[in-house]
Image: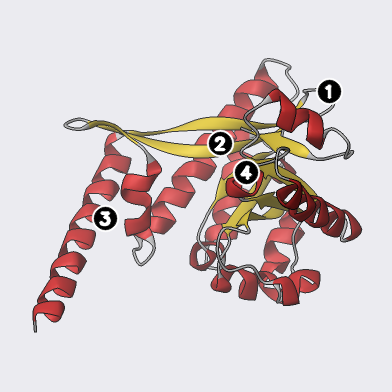
Amino acid sequence: MDKQKSRMSDERIGEGLANRISQGLRAGEFHLMFQGAYQVRTGRLSRAEAQVRWMHPQYGLLLPGVFMSQLEQSDVAYQMSCFMVERACHELSVCLGQAREPCPVSISVLPSVAMSEGFVQHIRETARSYGVAPNLLEIELPESEDAARVLSVRVLTQDLRDLGVGISYGEFGAGWAPFASLGALDIDTVKLARDLMATVPGDSRSCKVVESLLALFETLDVRVVVSGVETKEQAAWLGQWDGVLAQG
């Protein structure tokens, strides 16, 4: 009984937070920040990852870890994803208007949102309204069993493909790693979990793990973004691979 009460209480808290997030989206309390992914050898910006921030009127700046997990079973997840698409297209249109070369922007969405009715149409209409080519957007599905299932059935990603939107798989190696089905995943980019670089290049076994992953994805013709690159030594070590992007 106590467990049931606790679960019901958590559900009410989650529902209340989801409603408050929806209200915050309407009130303009959310904004995007962008983290770059750079070519290791040249330092050239090649990709940007959209990250949402909440400027709460009472609690100040809140990072995604505080609130995003509450959206997984909520309709607000769709609203948040549409907001991120709209803001990303706005920023891309600013770059185009200033005659600057834009780089693709990655937006993390839940598998349920990516496959939901109307989401691809929303991307199409939003990109058109801002004069942005859809191929400047990349939808990232965070690593999970659901994401792997969706990405392994190509008919489920066909609408995104027809629109020209890229597809990426995020934080590979952080949780449910589907090695058995990697060859079937319909992805352009994979982002490695930042923990994989924690002891590179100092630990030879860690280096072998990352080397093997980079070689595997190179064979599969999948672009790799390596998270957690925080030192010059790590960047120099990654420089031996062409095309690898570093984020950190």
Quadrant in the rendering for residue 37: top right
Callout count: 4
What residue did someone put label 1 on? 42
What residue did someone put label 3 on? 18
In the foreground, 37 or 96: 37
Q: Residues within 10 Å of mark 4 (few under 14, many from 20)?
A: many
N-terminal of the pair, mark 4 or mark 1, is 1
Q: Residue at x 32, y 58 (%)?
A: 70
What residue did someone put label 4 on? 106
Colour basis: secondary structure
Quadrant for the N terminus, please: bottom left
x and y, in percent, of residue 206 in the image: 71, 50
Left or right: 90 as drawn, with respect to 216: left
Q: Are marks 1 and 3 in contact (CB under 8 Å)?
A: no
Q: Residues within 10 Å of mark 3 (few under 14, many from 20)?
A: many
Q: Which residue is at the far bottom?
A: 1
What residue did someone put label 2 on? 88
Instruction: Choose mark 3 or mark 2, whichever is in front.
Output: 3
Q: Residue at x 80, y 28 (%)?
A: 236
N-terminal of the pair, mark 2 or mark 4, is 2
Q: CA distance from mark 3 to mark 4?
A: 23 Å
Q: Residue at x 28, y 49 (%)?
A: 22
User: Which element is circle 2 on?
Assistant: helix
Q: Residues within 10 Å of mark 2 (few under 14, many from 20)?
A: many
Q: CA distance from mark 3 to mark 2?
A: 22 Å
What amino acid does circle 4 point to? Ser
N-terminal of the pair, mark 3 or mark 4, is 3
x and y, in percent, of residue 51 in the image: 49, 38
- 32 over 4 or under it: above or below: above
Q: Are marks 3 and 4 in contact (CB under 8 Å)?
A: no
